[in-house]
Amino acid sequence: MVGDPIADMLTRIKNASAVQHKKVSVPYSSLKFAIAGVLRKQGFLGDISRKGRQIGKTIEITLVYDDSNKTKIKNAERISKPSRRVYFGVKDIKPIMNGYGKLILSTPKGILTGEEARRALVGGEVLFKIW
């Protein structure tokens, strides 16, 4: 039993990219699939797809590397946890790593990056930051 499925997903992605795997599988949930979609749109991940049926569903994620075979994901830090939820208003959303990183939020308009949430004038639960 996993206590924090989003942290588990991030850890699996970081570990797989650290050892140069091409793909990684994580247990499926609609929240994790939406997060993977946002990370794909931002260029941190390659293709994502659902595999399996019913209980054994997984998300298969293709990892992305640059020309020198270095991973696009340097690090990811979970901010809001099951034991401590962190919420930001639209005024609290600031750039991460001078604009090189992304803040991922769960908002009333869905899973958004910090920039998208600022443009949409919504705040929400801060899931993690990634760079």
Image (cartoon, rainbow, N blue to C red):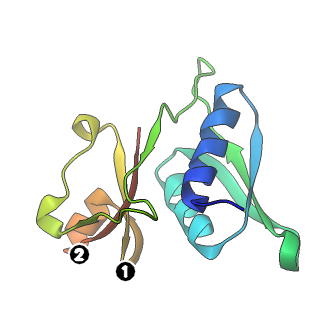
Category of crowding for the residue at label 2, using alpha-carbon neighbours closer than 10 angstroms: few (below 14), some (14–19), many (at least 20): many
Category of crowding for the residue at label 1, using alpha-carbon neighbours closer than 10 angstroms: few (below 14), some (14–19), many (at least 20): few
- Left or right: 16 as drawn, with respect to 7: right
Q: Secondary structure at mark 2?
A: loop
Residue 44 screen position, x and y as percent: 53, 44
Q: Secondary structure at mark 1?
A: loop
Q: What residue lies at 72% left-to-right and 62% top-to-bottom? A: 1
Residue 89 screen position, x and y as percent: 18, 69
Place residue 80 in its image quadrant: bottom left
Separation (CA) of disc 1 from disc 2:
8 Å
Q: What residue lies at 46% left-to-right and 51% top-to-bottom? A: 42
Quarter of the C terminus within the rendering: top left
The amino acid type of the residue labelled 2 equals: Val
- Residue 97 sits above or below residue 38 on the image: above
The amino acid type of the residue labelled 1 equals: Lys
Q: What residue lies at 55% left-to-right and 52% top-to-bottom? A: 7
- Residue 7 sits above or below residue 28 on the image: above
Q: Does the image show residue 30?
A: yes
- Left or right: 8 as drawn, with respect to 114: right
- Left or right: 131 as drawn, with respect to 72: left
Instruction: Read off the residue under disc 1.
Output: 109
Q: Does the image show residue 36?
A: no
Q: Do the residues under discs 1 and 2 have CB atoms within 8 angstroms? A: yes
Q: What residue lies at 62% left-to-right and 52% top-to-bottom? A: 8
Place residue 26 in its image quadrant: bottom right
Q: Which mark is residue 122?
A: 2
Residue 85 screen position, x and y as percent: 35, 66
Mark earlier in primary sequence (1, 2)? 1
Residue sitting nearer the eye, 41 or 93? 93
Give the residue at the far top of this rendering.
68
Residue 73 screen position, x and y as percent: 52, 36
- Left or right: 86 as drawn, with respect to 74: left
